[in-house]
Image (cartoon, coloured by chain):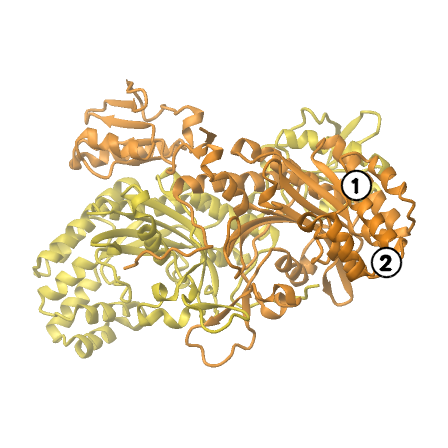
Chain colours: A orange, B yellow
Amino acid sequence: MAKSARLSGFPERLPAQRVIERSIIDTLEHTFALHGFSSIHHRAVEPLSQLAKDGEIDKEIFALSRLHSEGAERNPLGLHFDLTVPLARYVADNASELAFPFKATRIQPVWRGERPQQGRYREFIQADIDVIADTDLPGHFEVEIPLAVADAFSRLEPLGVPGIRIVVNDRRLLEGFARGIGLDNVQAVLRCLDKYDKVGPAEVARLLGVEAGANEEQQDLCLRLAAIESDSPEFAAEVRALGVEHPLLEEGLESLTTMLTAANDRAPGVIVAQLKIARGLDYYTGAVYETQLIGHEELGSVASGGRYDSLATVGRKNYPGVGMSIGVSRLMAHILDPATGITATRGTPSVVVIAVADEDRRADADAVATALRARDIACEVSPSAAKFGKQIRYAERREIPFVWFTDGEGGHEIKDIRSGEQTPADPATWEPADADRRPRVYRA
Amino acid sequence: MAKSARLSGFPERLPAQRVIERSIIDTLEHTFALHGFSSIHHRAVEPLSQLAKDGEIDKEIFALSRLHSEGAERNPLGLHFDLTVPLARYVADNASELAFPFKATRIQPVWRGERPQQGRYREFIQADIDVIADTDLPGHFEVEIPLAVADAFSRLEPLGVPGIRIVVNDRRLLEGFARGIGLDNVQAVLRCLDKYDKVGPAEVARLLGVEAGANEEQQDLCLRLAAIESDSPEFAAEVRALGVEHPLLEEGLESLTTMLTAANDRAPGVIVAQLKIARGLDYYTGAVYETQLIGHEELGSVASGGRYDSLATVGRKNYPGVGMSIGVSRLMAHILDPATGITATRGTPSVVVIAVADEDRRADADAVATALRARDIACEVSPSAAKFGKQIRYAERREIPFVWFTDGEGGHEIKDIRSGEQTPADPATWEPADADRRPRVYRA
């Protein structure tokens, strides 16, 4: 006998909201299938030893213990906080059974013990795509990943998701630039650049001095690099105009140029090189990505990722990977804002309620339902043989558009309760309009 | 940099296995939509106070704690061990926003800290359907639930799931019978009957004597009741022939008779009254259900449930419910047995690999992929411009049936690598056969 127990940071959806959430998930899954990503599903748990490697994330982990177990667990477990750590471990577990390069997508919840706040949850759904290679990972995958995400977002637009801007950079470019101007504490440079949007250029310059030992000229060059932003492969000329030379810088420039050239062709304007993007805390080694909802930049990145040169190891073999992670729950937080006007036509799958004239004639209604279901039409039989007015209100309250009546002598009529129109119908042939057949997401 | 870390009791699927698992899940979801069940998704956690009410289940709960949190949590949480407790709490949380009777389906993982064994896991997927009312729950829902499950299983047969037998009983029938023969410790009677299949009738008789205080005549009557099994509503005459009278017995008989009458009409032979079924530990108050895979009864019940007269409470209002839970992971354990011959055509969604003749001409291949995807054809571009033989082997290893070649001058050919046949093709019009379009589950 349960009682109410809402928990902050653990969103659950009402049926009509879930229709919207499922539409997003289905659209993402469908797009990633079109791009050749195999759909897999990770267990929720990992050994704590896999999760708690870098101090930064430790405090966010939910650890598990069995109630009433005797003593400490030999192999303590925690809930995964992202879908990258589980994928890396899955690849290590199954390396001999997978074909590489392995393209995988997972759409499922992750858990973080953070303080809940606007758009941040303790349980939230992520949709990830990754490509993992067992030797070299060709650079064109760094182009394919954001273009697949761009394709997915373009298909989400009818569901109320605004247009996006995927901002990209390349760790080699940043490292090569830093080393090329004589700053060898690359991590410190990345950490400083990472604060650009939060603290502004003047403070970044100061921090570069304090933390990376940059002199005024080096600070100035870093700021000039960080200010470069372009959706054209021509951006490389702006970088070269700064006069810095380093082989890593060249590699990064070439890779970003290739990406913008392909993007100009396949998703014009969506992908923007933004050389201040560093993603400071993560161990990326090539491309890095963040994604803004145009007009809603304050929500933060809704799809992030990058390239890791060493995602997993099996024996002496090393598995590089590149991927992005879409924050489905963060998108939902935006869509469910009443200002968007996005809503579902109904929360139940039924398009018809079959009325029951008399409890003794329930079998007549059941037979109609069986005939409709055999032709893929979702329906339900009225819960009671109440007055027809009450049965119609049952449908109305659920925004189910049709009520079906049987007269017990083989006669059938169907009423569209929006128009009030009632017409003869045959359970073997009646069809709803496509727009009514399933719950549908629309902008009010 | 992850390493391998398999965990016993936490199954993960390889891509082709996941195709099978998703086919099962999609079939269940689709069937339950046709029957008017709204799809919702529960958060993974509940307050421990909601989970740990009855001593029996305590030891199976995974409790959560935040790593490095200071001191005890104010509201300790655990992972849900079924989908009934979360639904009851969801109804209590959202009672004012839901329309009753509320028909809900959820297909998602649950967790139990049990010792893993054949067909039993620590993380496993359940598919539940329930109807919850806010006042009275009409008895016909006790009929609809197993018939919806029967419909779902009939649609699972092409995926290698054997035929089923849903065995049903009614708690009122058992309680009325026990009281009618003068045994007032009904819980003890249920507990003894629950052991029928495990220990046999002679031992059940002895236990009834010891635990329920039954004399020989009472023991004999109980065993004669427990032996009754029939798929016909005529079974009621066999019960009445035992000469026991009690109002609850009559209620239970009437309800089961209605169920078998409807079942004979809509799913002949699938639903069988089996009066030894008690489901001793659960707090059911009407119908109870278990489901056997025909020929694989040793797997145990693959779909169980029943009616609760008090699932949730809000203030003074009481919410009765009836539902069943399908063990998706247990079905998977059966299907993945190589003896079934069930397999998926491939683990990747791609039906075509677009070959790359030269890395400089990758954009040609990308353009073909974009054209195919626009017409809903899943494909991937070859990861490298290796020799064509190697690119064909890339497709072969993944059982992708087609490889597409571009000649750089607007010419296109497609090769079916099963037949070796190579023919001209147009990215704007080429279509795969329906059987090839998506990965498909079949019996080898």
Amino acid type at image mark 2: Leu
What quarter of the picture does the N terminus of chain A occupy? bottom left
Foreground pick, A437 / A279: A279
Residue B88 is drawn in which quadrant?
Answer: bottom left
The chain letter under disc 1 is: A
**Residue B356, placed above or below residue B431:** below
Q: Is residue A348 left or right of residue A389?
A: right
Q: Are marks 1 and 2 on the same chain?
A: yes
* Secondary element at image label 1: loop
Quarter-of-image position of residue A184 = bottom right
Report the number of numbered marks: 2
Query: Measured from the top left, where is residue A127 in percent x and y?
Result: 58, 47
Residue occupied by mark 1:
A228
Residue pictured at 62% horizontal, 68% vertical: A52
Q: Determine the secondary structure under disc 2.
A: loop
Judge whether B340 appears above or below B101 on screen. below
The disc labelled 1 sits on which kind of residue?
A: Ile
Which residue position is annotated with label 2? A183
The answer for how far apart the CA atoms under marks 1 and 2 are is 19 Å
Name the subunit of mark 2.
A
Q: Nearer the viewer, residue A386 or A278?
A: A278
From where the camera sits, is residue A134 visible? no
Between A218 and A427, the residue placed more toward the observer is A218
